[in-house]
Image (cartoon, rainbow, N blue to C red):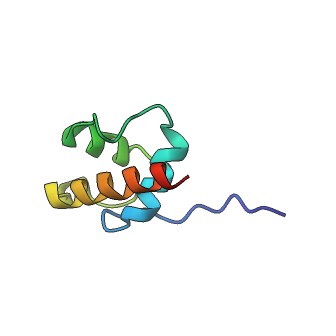
Amino acid sequence: MISDYRPALYWDSAFAIALALIENHPKVDPEKIGLEELASLVERLPGFVDDPDFVTDRILLDIIVVWYEELHSL
């Protein structure tokens, strides 16, 4: 049986966040998203539990890189 378990997402979970973005926002292009829009998308992901004030541009850029790499490795 496949579990519907979703781990809690934190800002430092770039890989898990990237997978959640692919699943929840398949039409969004990581090459065309702004950092503020990305932060908003991440904060609304199911399972996201971190403090929105903890995010930095570096964290958001890391998420974009992982998101892009995962999209292009599929």
Q: Is residue 52 visible?
A: yes
- Seen at 38% across and 50% down, the residue is 68
Residue extending farthest to the front is: 73
- Res 66 quadrant in image: bottom left
Q: Residue 11: percent from the left, percent from the top?
A: 31, 62
Q: Residue 4: percent from the left, percent from the top?
A: 69, 58
Q: Residue 35: percent from the left, percent from the top?
A: 20, 43
Q: Quadrant of the N terminus?
A: bottom right
Q: Residue 34: percent from the left, percent from the top?
A: 21, 37
For the image, the number of numbered tags is 0
Residue extending farthest to the left is: 57
- Seen at 24% across and 54% down, the residue is 60
- Seen at 47% across and 49% down, the residue is 71
**Vertical relation: 13 (above or below) 64:** below
**Nearest to the observer: residue 13 or residue 64:** 64
Would residue 50 be found to the left or right of residue 56 on screen? right
**Nearest to the observer: residue 51 or residue 74:** 74
Q: Is residue 47 visible?
A: no
Residue extending farthest to the top is: 27
